[in-house]
């Protein structure tokens, strides 16, 4: 049973420890939950900033919904970072609901989000609780840009792109993120077209030209992302397409080529064989935990183009250190939930629950992001 108001599940992972950094910065006590208490303590001692001044405990717990519910009980908010969420996410969601906790996670895995919305959305709402997936750099900053664009009257069509500094390996992609990326080969990728989620064509790639870059950035649908799911039932939006790219075009083309190889060679293999293929890819591309991000290297541009019958606008969010920013967004959400200040319960995005202006302001005040909007 947790004795502190916020639980960080996945305490020995890269993102989990960054969330702890920000909880300590905001003087919020937390319970760290991990499969191994010993490893969590060792990793936290190495990685978590100002740990010596934190109020925290560590609980060892197996990845099982009933066991996790007992570990979460007594808390108010669960920050879940254990992915790939399409494989492991729902156990944490079910445990948070059973324990009477709000649930935040960090993923934009579309198939997982659709399952969570249908299976748990109404249950969280009836319990007065929020389930907010994808509370992270990717894709909350793109949603902030989208919401800034929607402030222009008449906009009902959104195209967003999340562009991050590479190359991908030296940019510091975590093991969990890499596993999630390659899990997307097994999932459909959808975008919103005339109020309906429809499939992206197989092997779709986009050359995205943006004024912030000298040359086009090669982008992929990245599993569809969370934004079409969040906007599917939003009466303001009829169309939404969301893309992801890293400045390293060769690396992104390699990801696309692996997707084609998957379709040709691995798609029809038994799941256990596919699991082995993905594990080998993850090990070869991301052998260990990356170093802490640097503002001089890890920089991102997220933008949304909004259009209507006559309206046109472009909103841009510049930011640094995506994983550190994810920790800040989780802390910002936890603050509001501990205050009981959420505009939404049930399944909703962080922007829908707390307001895009609040989240943007939280990041701006800490030197992590800035935004500008230009109407056309």
Image (tube, rainbow, N blue to C red):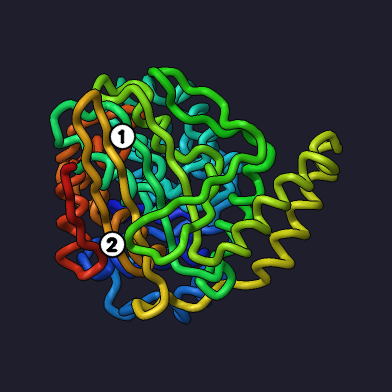
Tell me residue 60's x, y (percent): 53, 58
Report whether 53 appears left or right of 32.
left
Tell me, yes or no, if residue 57 can be seen here: no
Q: How many labels does the image show?
A: 2
Q: As displayed, is residue 104 above or below residue 137?
A: above
Report whether 199 appears left or right of 131.
right
The residue shown at (58%, 45%) is 205
Tell me residue 363's x, y (percent): 22, 61
Residue placed most toward the observer, 96 or 308: 308
The residue shown at (18%, 63%) is 364
Pointers 1 and 2 in contact (C-beta within 8 Å): no
Q: Which of marks 1 and 2 is nearer the N terminus?
A: 1
Query: Which element is circle 2 on?
Result: strand
Tell me, yes or no, if residue 176 can be seen here: yes
Residue 130 badge: 1
User: How dense is the environment of label 1, judged by Cα within 10 Å: few (below 14), some, or many (20 and up)?
Assistant: many
Report whether 191 appears left or right of 39.
left
The residue shown at (55%, 57%) is 177
Q: Which of marks 1 and 2 is in front?
A: 2
Residue 261 badge: none
User: How dense is the environment of label 2, judged by Cα within 10 Å: few (below 14), some, or many (20 and up)?
Assistant: some
Residue placed most toward the observer, 172 or 42: 172
The residue shown at (32%, 54%) is 330
Query: Which element is circle 1 on?
Result: strand
Residue 318 badge: 2
Tell me residue 369's x, y (percent): 24, 63
Location of residue 313 (image quadrant): top left
């Amino acid at each position: 049973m947790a004795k502190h108001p916020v639980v960080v599940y996945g305490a020995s992972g890269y993102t989990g420890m960054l969330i702890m950094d920000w909880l300590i910065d905001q003087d919020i006590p937390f319970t760290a939950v991990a499969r191994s208490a010993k490893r969590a303590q060792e990793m936290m001692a190495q990685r978590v900033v100002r740990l010596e001044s934190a109020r925290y405990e560590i609980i060892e717990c197996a990845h099982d919904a009933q066991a996790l519910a007992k570990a979460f009980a007594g808390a108010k908010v669960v920050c879940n970072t254990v992915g790939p969420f399409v494989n492991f996410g729902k156990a944490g969601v079910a445990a948070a609901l059973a324990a009477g906790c709000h649930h935040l996670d960090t993923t934009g895995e579309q198939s997982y989000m659709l399952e969570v919305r249908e299976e748990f959305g109404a249950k969280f709402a009836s319990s007065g609780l929020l389930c907010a997936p994808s509370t992270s750099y990717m894709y909350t900053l793109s949603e902030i840009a989208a919401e800034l664009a929607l402030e222009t009257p008449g906009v009902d069509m959104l195209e967003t792109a999340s562009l991050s500094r590479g190359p991908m390996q030296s940019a510091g992609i975590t093991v969990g993120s890499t596993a999630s990326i390659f899990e997307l080969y097994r999932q459909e990728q959808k975008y919103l077209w005339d109020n309906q989620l429809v499939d992206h064509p197989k092997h779709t790639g986009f050359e995205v030209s943006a004024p912030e870059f000298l040359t086009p950035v090669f982008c992929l649908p990245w599993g569809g992302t969370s934004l079409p799911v969040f906007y599917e039932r939003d009466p303001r939006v009829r169309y939404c397409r969301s893309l992801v790219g890293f400045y390293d075009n060769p690396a992104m083309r390699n990801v696309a080529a692996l997707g084609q190889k998957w379709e040709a060679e691995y798609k029809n293999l038994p799941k256990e064989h596919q699991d082995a293929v993905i594990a080998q890819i993850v090990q070869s591309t991301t052998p260990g935990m990356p170093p802490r991000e640097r503002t001089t290297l890890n920089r991102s541009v997220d933008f949304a183009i909004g259009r209507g019958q006559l309206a046109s606008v472009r909103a841009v969010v510049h930011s640094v250190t995506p994983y550190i920013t994810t920790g800040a967004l989780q802390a910002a959400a936890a603050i509001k939930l501990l205050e009981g200040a959420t505009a939404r319960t049930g399944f909703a995005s962080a922007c829908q629950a707390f307001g895009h202006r609040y989240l943007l302001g939280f990041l701006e005040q800490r030197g992590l992001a800035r935004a500008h909007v230009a109407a056309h």
